[in-house]
Amino acid sequence: MYVNRELSWLEFNQRVLAQAMRADLPLLERLKFLAISSSNMDEFFQVRVGGLMLLRGSVKGVTELAGLSSSRQLRLIRKRAQRMMREQYRLLNRELLPLLQAAHLAPTRVADLTESQRGIMEIYFDNQLAAALSPLAMDVPKPPILPSLHLIVGLELYDEDERSSRFVAIPLPDSLPRRIHFPGAGRDGYVLIEELVCAFVEKFFPGERVLHKSPFRVTRNGDILLEEEGGDMAREMGEVLVARQFSDCVRLELPADTPKSFTKRIAVVVDADEDAIYELAGPLRLADFMALAFEPGNDALKVPAWKPVDAAGVDRTLSMFENMALGDILINSPFEGYEPVLRLVEEAAADSDVIAIKQVLYRTSRDSRFVRALCRAAEAGKQVTVLVEIKARFDEQRNLLQAQLLQRSGVQVVYGVKGFKTHAKVLLIVRREQGSLRRYCHFGTGNYNESTARLYGDLSLLTCDELLGADASQFFNSVMGLTRLTHFRRIYPSPVMMKQRLVALIDAEAARAALGQRAEIKAKLNSLNDMEMMAALQRAAEAGVQVSLNIRGVCCWAPSTPNEVANTRIVSIVDTYLEHARIISFYNDGKTLVYLASADWMARNLDRRVELMVPISDPKLAKRALGILDACLRDNTQAYELMADGSYTAVAALQRSRSMLPNLVMPKPFRMQEFLHKQAAARAAARALRQTLEPHRPKEMG
């Protein structure tokens, strides 16, 4: 009935890797998905594997919902991860590198450089690299701890006079480029930095002979929690960041051709267990090849870009306040541009009638327009209050720096809520209009990040609805004033109201189905693993409710009983944009309820985070959101369907097999993201046509 969370996540990453395996996709799109699958594995090992290793060492006899102990999970993870990594490098070596070579985009080995090119690379090493490198002696009483996720060159040196060997590690700073371009090969010719360092590293050690040299990489446990016992939160988070860099080793990666004796020595140096060693048949840190896919040029090797169109509900000639006063606005990014959300906060910063701005920031871009606008607003004398969640994993350092920048401008900054992560996406602007105050709100499914808004599929609701505005004010009073999350009329926050509301709505559908009435639940989420939510869905499916779910990543419920299988369909879509929006709908006896949310149906979101679920009340906008849900379920080019055994099968393959049965025809290809792009373009074109003034002209006289 239940699927292990970690193994389910690995199957999601396999679906990402499957995109890289598609010969019908352009080369750099395939390389992008290979890099994403590698980056995903980095975070998985830091957080999920690191957490399980801690659990294995501290808690005995405890199993998760699928009945697996920590030790058993780790064994299964290692086996599955090893297989996936072999597939990654088989794909790289057999297909992608030859294609990159043909396109003059593959790395060149130093041994293959001409004598002239090698000489120039040696000069580059001497003048540009050597001063930035710091060899670290490891055979000392207290050896330095090597940093996590960095490329490191390891060396075994032999001193002829001393007749002894020693181990030295040279971390390669991330500030140095991974690809070092050399002359005579066009703009795309390059060698990898670790190979260049290995080629000339003897210069650091006169009088010693290099016995072995090899790049390697350590992944350390990133599942280190902040002890929220009071005190200086910023200082305590800084300590967590330091601890994460130097915690226990959970994975050691090195080239497969590294001599076994040297591999063992590296493992001893980094304190890696034998089952934590991953020998890879190619360059380490494949995530770095992502840059090739996004650099300008080589357009023939990329998928054609979909340019975002203007949001259908926004008139550029009006201010955002005027636009919102005309009615609620729903933005489906990145098919529709995210600019209206940025405009809203930037116009608020400059508007003399705006008296207060309140916002939650979870993950922002590096040079955030939101942060800059909030600073300008505070400097202009407005009351600006921002909750900066410094516990946003792997963005803590950036959030700390941006919080300090906000504070220097006079913004009142709150560092999250004690004991919880604040993951809600909400912006509230209070404006003085005609002698009274009016609230303008933004609720979203994605972060306030203009960079990821171009890559993630998310929804934004812009509204000046009075009840939603009042609830937004109450929400900020609660999370910033440490009062209880109660007295909301339209929105449903977690951890206190959202799950209860969802379970009640699911059970209501089940009750109607039991009476023979039409009952439907549709949802688009990133993950599902909450026991209470899965139990409620099981009850609903058993009662006859049609349950249709689009769950991109982890799904721990695999419908298995005859009724569950008959009444439930779960799909996952992996495509050009990361599916990130959370949309939920209930048929509700024909009075359909539609919500957008910041939360997935996971225990951490519903019980241990501050999240928001917001109704879409405008019938036209609710219909649009339902259309997105339906498009997810129609996709037969990028979608995978969950089987009863917890595996996934491409929907296209299922439809091909079914089309072989009598009287069944293969459906036409339907790609959800392409459909949403065309739909957004058609709405924008229709709006532009309505706004075009065309004068009547008299007919010509005959």
Image: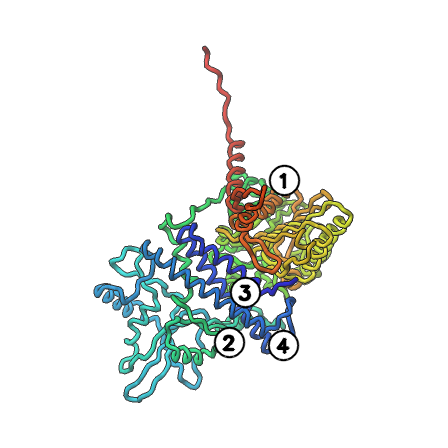
Residues at marks 3 and 1, CA–CA distance in whole angstroms: 37 Å
- Which of the marked residues, 4 or 2, is nearer the chain's N terminus? 4
Numbered disc in front, either 2 or 3: 2
Q: What residue did someone put label 3 on?
A: 393
Kindly identify the amino acid type of the residue bearing the numbered disc 4. Answer: Val
Residue that carries the numbered disc 1 in the rendered image: 620
Residue 499 lies, with reference to residue 212, above or below; the image says: above
Residue density around tag 3, few if under 14, some if 14–19, many if 20 or more, within 10 Å: some
Q: How is the image coloured?
A: rainbow
Disc 3 on helix, strand or loop?
loop
**Residue 248: image tag:** 2
Q: How many marks?
A: 4
Which amino acid, mark 3? Arg
Quarter the C terminus occupies? top left
Mark in front: 4 vs 2: 4
Residue sitting at 36 percent across and 73 percent down?
Answer: 214
Q: Is residue 181 above or below residue 702?
A: below
Q: Quadrant of the N terminus?
A: bottom right
Q: SS at mark 4?
A: loop
Across and down, in percent, residue 30 comes to 43, 55
- Please name the amino acid that badge 2 sits on: Asp
The residues tagged by marks 4 and 1 sit, at their Cα atoms, a distance apart of 52 Å
> Mark 4 to mark 2: distance in Å?
17 Å
How far is mark 4 from mark 3, CA to CA? 24 Å
Secondary structure at numbered mark 2 = loop
Q: Badge 1 local density, few (<14 within 10 Å), some, or many (20+)?
A: few
Marks 4 and 1: which is nearer the front?
Answer: 4
Front disc: 4 or 3? 4
User: Marks 2 and 3, how far apart in space?
Assistant: 18 Å
Identify the mark nearer the N-term, 2 or 1.
2
Circle 4 sits on which residue? Answer: 59
Residue 22 at what x, y percent from top left? Answer: 45, 53
